[in-house]
Amino acid sequence: MNEDVFNMSVRGFLKKVGITAQREMENTVREALSKGSLTGKEKLPAKVTLTLGQTSLTLVIDGEIELE
């Protein structure tokens, strides 16, 4: 295995995940605010599940997104 290639590939994937997830969360929250299903004062539970094909990796990360 080439460590440099692996490292760059992991970093690229995580960057894509981060950018895409942030955009989707922002759009979803803004839409919910405009529809009135959120007030803007919530703390929203968040969870990410990461799996890696052909390995035993399953990683769950829990968190919270505050709107105020």
Image (cartoon, helix red, strand yellow):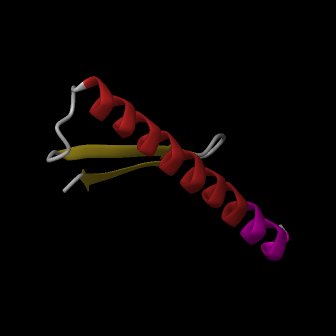
Q: Where does the image place residue 7, in percent across and percent down from the top left? A: 73, 70
**Quarter of the image containing the N terminus?**
bottom right
Q: Where does the image place residue 9, in percent across and percent down from the top left? A: 76, 61
Residue beneath the point at 65% across and 53% down: 16
Residue 34 visible in rendering: yes
Q: Where does the image place residue 21, in percent across and percent down from the top left? A: 51, 46
Q: Relative to 67, is 48 on the left or the right?
A: right
Q: Residue 64 or 47: which is nearer the viewer?
A: 64
Q: Quadrant of residue 40?
A: top left
Q: Which residues are magenta?
A: 2-9
Q: Where does the image place residue 14, in percent across and percent down from the top left? A: 61, 58
Residue 56 visible in rendering: no
Residue beneath the point at 72% across and 61% down: 12
Q: Relative to 40, is 56 on the left or the right?
A: right
Q: Relative to 59, is 42 on the left or the right?
A: left
Is 66 located above or below residue 4 in the figure?
A: above
Task: Examine the residues drawn in magenta and state their main secondary structure.
Answer: helix
Residue beneath the point at 83% across and 68% down: 5
